[in-house]
Each structure stands twice: as C-alpha cells, then as structure tokens.
Image (tube, coloured by chain):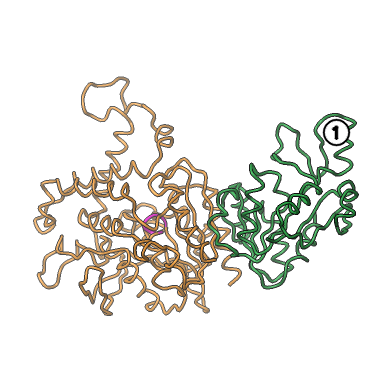
Amino acid sequence: MKQEFKIISDLIEKNTRVLDVGCGDGILMEYLKYNKEIDIRGIEISKDNVQKCLSKGLTVIEGDAEKDLLQFPDGSFDFVILSQTLQAFLNPEIVINELLRVGKKAIVTIPNFGFWKVRLHLLIKGTMPITKNLPDEWYNTPNLHMCTIKDFYNFCEDRKIKLDKSLALHNEKISSINKFNLNGKNLSAELGIFLIEN
Amino acid sequence: MNKNVNIKNIIIDKPLKLDCGQIINNYSLAYETYGSLNEKKDNAILIFHALTGDQFVSGINPITKKEGWWSYAVGPGKAIDTDKYFVICANVIGGCMGSYGPSEINPDTNKKYGITFPVITINDMVNAQFNLLNFFNIDKLFAVMGGSMGGMQTLQFVNNFPNKAKVAIPIACTASHSAQNIAFNELGRQSIMADVNWENGDYSNQNKNPNKGLSVARMAAHITYLSKNGLQEKFGRKLQERDNLKFGFDADFQIESYLRYQGSVFVDRFDANSYLYITRAMDYFDLIKEHHGNLSKAFEKTKTKFLIISFTSDWLYPTSENKEIVIALNAIGAEVGFVEIESDKGHDSFLLKVPKFLNTLGDYIKTAYSKN
C-alpha cells in the first residue's frame, strides 16, 4: 500500500535513526531510504526475507521482535515503525512497550478489524472475514490479535500513551481521527496509522 | 611439505611485539592474491583463513594440487568476484605454508623452531597481516572477512584497526572461545603430544613425524565441523566395501573409513606443531575479556559495516555466539546485518556449496561495493 508508505514517510523527520520492526522483504525500508535522508535498520523473523534485505544492501538483522528488541538500548532510535504487524504477535502489549522504549517515537499501522466490510462479512456470512488487507483463512492466518482502530485508540488512552497523530486511511484517502469521529472512522477506514510516544 | 614452490612472501622488518612479550622482526609472511587492485585502490578484500587453511583461497593450491579452501566463494564470477575485487590472503603466523611458524628454521640455532616457537595469539596474527596494507600500498580495505578462526581475526582486525575496512564479514565464529571449543582443541593437542614421534616437538629435526597423533586430532576435529544430521544422511550405518560386519577393528563403517581418510590426507599438508600453536591461539581468543566484559567497547571507534552470518546446524560456533556479536554492535548503534542460514552441513557450511549463503554473501558485497 503505497499511500501508507507515503504517510509513514511524512511522519518521519530528516536525518533521524529509524528501525523497521518486522521489515519483511524490505520494501518499506527501500521506499524510506529512497525518499528520506535517514539511517534505517530493520529486524525480521523470516530467514528468506532477511536474505532478500541483505542482498538489497539493507541493514537488517534476523530476529524476533518479541525477544530481540531487548538488545537495543533505550531511545536508540528516533522512530520505530511497526507496519501492519502488531496483530501477529503473541503479546502485542509487550511489543508496544518495547517500541516505546527503543524508539523516542513509534509509528504503528493496523489493519482495522472494525472496517464495515469486515463487520458485514462476519454479520452476513458468519465466517471469519477475508478482505484485501486480511487475505488469510482463520486456520492459516498469521494474525493472532486482530484489533480495531477504536481498540488501539482506547489502548493508548488507557495507558497514557501520547497519540501525536491518529490517521485513518480509506481508498487512499487520509483523514484525522479524534475522539469525536472515532466511531465513524472505526467503521469507514481500512487502516489506522498512529504516531505515538510515551 | 614442498615449500618455496610458488609461494610468495614478504619479509617484515618492522618489529612486532607478541602478546607473550617476545619481539619478532624480519619474519616471513606468505601470501597469495587474486584479481587486481584498481586505480582507486578501493577494491581490496583481505580474507583470513581458518585453523587448517592457508593463503591459497581459490584456484588450484600449488602445494596440495587441490582446489583452494574457499573456491566455492572466491573466484571469477563468484560471490567474492576476483574479476572485480583484489583478494589478498596470507598464511597466519604460526602456520606451515611459508609464514613464520614452528616448522621454519630458527636462524640463531639453524634448527627448526619446534616448540621453542613463541606462543602466538589471534591478535598477533592480525597485527602481522596488517603489514600487507603497507606492502600493497592500500590505505583502506574494502572488506575484511573470514569464517571460523578467520571470523575471529576479522573481529580482532576491526578492534585493532577501526578505520581500515569499510565492511567486515565475520562468519560462523565467536568473540570468545568457549570451554567446549577449548576442550576439543585440547583433545587434538593431547593426541599429537601422545604420539611417540612428536619427540617433545623436535620431530622435524629428528626426521620423524607424529602422523598418527595429528591424524587423530584431525579426525576428532572433523566430527565437530559436521552435524549429526549431515553425518547420518551421508553415512548412516553404511558399511565400507563389505556386506557384513567383520567382528574386528578395521573400518567396517563408511564413516570410519571417511574419517581415517581425512586424517591421512591432512598429515601430508599440515604440520603438527602448527596445529598446537594455532589451536592455542584460538583458545586464547577472548575479545570480551579484552574489554572487561563489554564486547561493544571493541567496536566503539569503528564505522565499519558488519554482516554476521551463522548456520543452523553449526554446534561448534553456534548462532547464539554469533548473535552475541550482533547484540554488542547493536548496543552501540553500529551498522550490522545478521542472518542465520539454514544448512545441515554443520560448521563447515561456510566452506561448502550452500547457495543461500553464497548468494546472500555475493549480493551483500556487490551492493556494499556499489555504494562506495
């Protein structure tokens, strides 16, 4: 999703140190490297993806974000990115805490399980939703902890995590999320993008 | 060993103070090069060899007449492309392929050094090889790399000379030799020293050779270079040129025959005392202790870019030990990439045809060089 990349890129300041957690084959890292003067690193669990990243000259380490973020000192990155990966962790809460420890700020994007098509799918068909952003079946999905934009928003509010920016993305259109339009955005957006800090 | 045949060497007159306190000068460093140094002198790669390696990385080794030890990785069009890069490799001091080592003649006594040779360290090896930069008039290497003991030298090189290499690739190694590593090395040394022909290290002056001891050392070590699955798959319980067990101690099993063969060919190309000295140097290697428990300090001053590679089935220098280096580098924000390559070939994976390893290595080097 190119629009997501552009938004992430706009949230990041120049000449900063950035860590992409769960960087996959490095597509976002390449985009950011090309568009922004930043020092970017990645961590990725799949060997194949790590090999692809290293082959492209990206500085990536193989590792599990749930365990291996520990090696990075507090505040060692200006921005830590978690793009559409939060739902795949065994313990998303620990990961969020780690992101906010390692990074001065974190950018978290989540596929919105509250999106109306997802809700409709479950309501009408009665089976686990399959959409563009959620293409897998219930039995083979890597997604363990799906959440909605509203869930994540409330999560941050409850834990006094500062929401510097909350953006909703639908059909490549961006809009801001606030507590007054939260229910509406939770229905209309496919993706939520949050800039958070402790 | 057929020395002085096709062996290039430089005599280093700059004195070197060894870790043991002894100062050496006018010592020989045997080397080989592949490819050519470009005008900008920015394409040089210094490769460090492992315990039983030598300077003949690629092509046909003129002494053994066999393929160079890293022929899968180094050569024209290979991961380390000698059409593009200038590859230098030297025999470590303590070795037996023309560099200053225990099988060389001591000019003071006109006899071979034997065990009067000083105990050397990985640090000494690296300091000796640093003279190659001066010799080739290279200010900064594009890369330093090596597997196993070659990886240890790579780490030591960056520690000693933080701004002399753009890229460092330590492979299947450790920052500190473990008790298990030391134990296996001690087994090999004891085997050599238990051979009556070792003669307290003076065998070559008496025209003897502790071949049995050295070959057993090699056999034991060889097992540690492979994985259980790899061995099982290749040999299983297959019998050696026989249909039934013979109820004796001949090599009934193929694995026995294979190990005996490995031992027997090794003694033709390697010096027993060198084996003692080099394994000792590995055992003494502890970059963590050198920095009082904080490995990060070894790399604080460097801008060198690291790529660290380990292998799933390597139990001699396991991923956990390679990862310690990654962690130390990340702790200080150094630029480090890391991948564990899937392979059932054990520690030897770095020397063998493991396509995922060779491709990743080759692509990484290519992109790192293009950003020069």
Mark 1 residue type: Leu
Tell me which chain the residue with mark 1 is part of.
A
Instruction: Give B68 or B311, whichever is nearer the viewer.
Output: B311
- In the image, taking residue A149 as reference, residue A55 lies left or right, namely left
- Determine whether B182 is above or below B76 in the image: above
**In the rendered image, which quarter contains the C terminus of chain B?**
bottom right
The chain in green: A
Q: Is residue A34 left or right of residue A169?
A: left
Residue B60: x and y, percent?
Answer: 38, 56
Colour chain B is painted in: orange
Residue on which the image places disc 1: A122
* Residue B148 within the segment the image draws in magenta: yes
The residue located at (29%, 40%) in the rendering is: B261
Find residue B96 and report its horizontal and vertical position in percent. Answer: 25, 60
Residue at image location 62% in from the left, 58% down from the top: A42
Asked if the stretch drawn in magenta spans residue B7, the answer is: no
Viewer-side residue, B171 vs B216? B171
Q: Which residues are magenta?
A: B147-151
Q: Residue at x 75, y 42 (%)?
A: A146
Give me the residue at 41% from left, 32% from top: B232
